[in-house]
Image (spheres, rainbow, N blue to C red):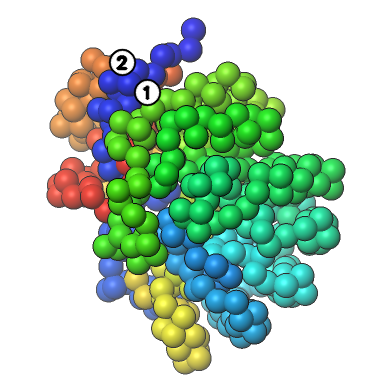
Amino acid sequence: MKPAVTRELLERFDVPGPRYTSYPTADRFVEAFGASDYILALGQRRNGAAALALPLSIYVHIPFCESLCYYCACNKIVTKHKSRAAPYLDYLRREVALHIAHLGRGQTVSQLHLGGGTPTFFSDEQLSELMALLRDNFNLVAGGEYSIEIDPRTVDEQRLRHLARLGFNRLSFGVQDFDPAVQKAVHRIQPAEQVFDLVAKARAIGFESVNIDLIYGLPRQTAESFERTLAQVGQLRPERIALYAYAHLPERFKPQRRIHAEELPPAGGKVSMLAGALQAFDAAGYVYVGMDHFALPEDALAVAKRQGRLHRNFQGYSTQPDCDLIGLGVSAIGKVGATYCQNAKTMDDYTDMIDHGTLPVVRGLAVTRDDLLRRAVIMAIMCQGEVLFESIESAHLVDFHSYFAPELEQLQTLQAQGLVEVGDAAIRVTAMGWFFVRGVALVFDKYLQADRTRARFSKII
């Protein structure tokens, strides 16, 4: 029997919390961590045995967009001047060279993701140059996961074929909502027919997986209008769906100031949209992977969840084992060894540091022993839905019950709600608890528990 997610539980967990694509989360990065610290981590990887055994993941941030989507909280540069792409590609080339100087050439890569912005702002020739640059310096292995984010308004069949020739095997289409009134309100007009046509062509070309991004809580959305979008998504039947809650933070993200607050659905309306989505995806046969990800049963992500091989990184859930991540481009985040780092967020700062021959890292974090321990627990919750005490104790040399006594006490409330089962040897997230897994994970977040400042995060459901 599948659990019935009640409206009461949805409303109770309609609170902010981290997405746990990392732990500690990126808001904990400090400016005291800089390029020299990152270079040290790269050198340790180069000289360590892990460099031979564990593949890399690479993320490339391409910040340019031709038009502004009002809901967007990404780091982007809105411009119609395609001439800006060539200099940026040159800086990416120089940033790769700086990495290779400290990391060495030819390290194995099993996962690559191009995000933005709009990666397809680059021309076919520029995308070819970028992929050639990466292949010249890294070993992109056969069978890896190579994905790119797609704005449906920027591609056609010819471009999709070119992406396939370059080695991309997964596409992520930004849809958000099919309703014309909602699209107008967020300044992103793209007819459903266009998306359906592109997805059909992508399948004919042979892409392994198509992901569709949706957002609920946008202006002019209603439970009824979103139900129509969900029905269209059911007809489209993408292999994966990412369903995000819109977080209206105009004080932090300037584009959102163009959204009229009075047009946003009330909290109860958002909960109705989420409940409707959960029902619709379940009825369509999708597996709830966790948090905001859904996949068809035969998709690699759903298979990984069934087999206990699910992992999580800065791009979300992944089938690839936990590994070091090299972030390239303005604002990109990386993870090497026991460190996190982030590049400069403005183009001026990013290019200035590279012009001075320095990796453009402006902040980051060297994680502590406690961070590593809590990261292991949180990722086990987020990915496997299970924490085995003996495994944690042997890996981190602690007594779980003593070390996490306050957290185990907090879990009693969640256990009473039917979201977790706490035994003598393990914590297990129930089928119901998967829908609120961020709420379970944040119990072990030392930083969040200390300050309770959650307003900067999206809602945990």
What is the distance, in whole Å, between disc 1 and disc 2 at their CAs? 7 Å
Q: Is residue 62 above or below residue 399?
A: below
Q: Report the disc number at residue 433.
A: 1
Would you say residue 62 is visible in this rendering?
A: no
Q: Amino acid at mark 1?
A: Gly
Q: Is residue 122 above or below residue 246?
A: below
Residue sitting at x 27%, y 73%: 32
Q: Report the disc number at residue 418.
A: 2
Mark 2 closeness class: few <14, some 14–19, many ≥20 residues within 10 Å: some
Residue 454, percent across and down?
23, 48
Tell me if 368 is positioned left or right of 19 in this view.
left
Residue 270, percent across and down?
36, 35
In this figure, what is the number of numbered marks?
Answer: 2
Residue sitting at x 44%, y 40%: 221
Q: Amino acid at mark 2?
A: Gly
Q: Nearer the viewer, residue 217 or 144?
A: 217
Name which quarter of the figure residue 306 lies in. top right
Would you say residue 8 is visible in this rendering?
A: yes
Residue sitting at x 50%, y 65%: 68
Tell me if 448 is positioned left or right of 387 in this view.
left
Q: Is residue 423 above or below residue 326?
A: above
Tell me if 55 is positioned left or right of 365 in this view.
right
Q: Secondary structure at mark 2?
A: loop
Q: Which circle's residue, 1 or 2, is located before the other in the chain?
A: 2
Contact between marks 1 and 2 (CB within 8 A): the answer is yes
User: From the image, which quarter does the C terminus lie in?
Assistant: top left
Residue sitting at x 67%, y 65%: 120
Q: Secondary structure at mark 1?
A: helix
Residue 3, percent across and down?
43, 14
Name which quarter of the figure residue 337 lies in. bottom left
